[in-house]
Amino acid sequence: MFFLNVASPFTLILLLIATILLIFLAQELKKSYIVAIPLFLYLALLVMHVVQLLTLKPELTQMIQPLSYCLAVDFVFVLITFFAYLWVDDLEAKKMGKKSIDNSLDWFWKSV
């Protein structure tokens, strides 16, 4: 069974660096689709890990704990990229003079 362990320290650091660099690039270019790409990739990873956990064979019960850690890491990265997408979308909307998709987090962006 193929298993992408995103909870290992090396992979976690690489994913974090790549995510931060993509968020910084999107913020500089003011293009929200740049942050949407890793968001969809992390959602795909989340779905993949859930499917692997649900279809786990009884002889592979030792994989439950690493898969659970991967699910937790996936949720954190989805949360980070989702907020980054909303932030960059707000920046892009202000640059273009358009209304952003959702203005419900204006109180949060003003305090950041």
Image (tube, rainbow, N blue to C red):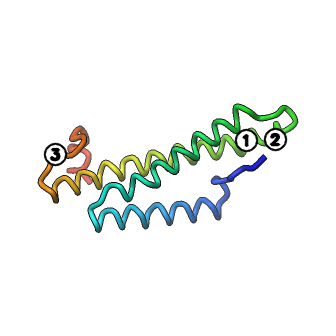
Q: Amino acid at mark 1?
A: Gln
Name the N-terminal-most of marks 1 and 3. Answer: 1
Instruction: Examine the rendered structure and indicate whether residue 60 appears above or below residue 36.
Output: above
Instruction: Examine the rendered structure and indicate whether residue 75 appears above or below residue 11.
Output: above
Rendered image quadrant of residue 56:
top right
Mark 3 element type: loop
Q: Are marks 1 and 3 in contact (CB under 8 Å)?
A: no
The residue at the point 16 percent across, 59 percent down is: 95
Frontmost residue, 39 versus 77: 39
Q: Are marks 1 and 2 in contact (CB under 8 Å)?
A: yes
Mark 2 element type: helix
Name the N-terminal-most of marks 3 and 2. Answer: 2
Q: Is disc 3 surrounded by few (<14), some (14 to 19) or many (20+) residues within 10 Å?
A: few
Residue 47 pos. (x, y %): 58, 39
Residue 49 pos. (x, y %): 64, 42
The residue at the point 23 percent across, 51 percent down is: 90
Residue 12 pos. (x, y %): 59, 59
Q: Amino acid at mark 3?
A: Lys
Q: Which residue is mark 1?
A: 65
Frontmost residue, 21 versus 45: 45
Q: Amino acid at mark 2?
A: Gln
Residue 91 pos. (x, y %): 22, 56
Furthest-right residue in view?
59
> Which labelled disc corresponds to residue 62?
2
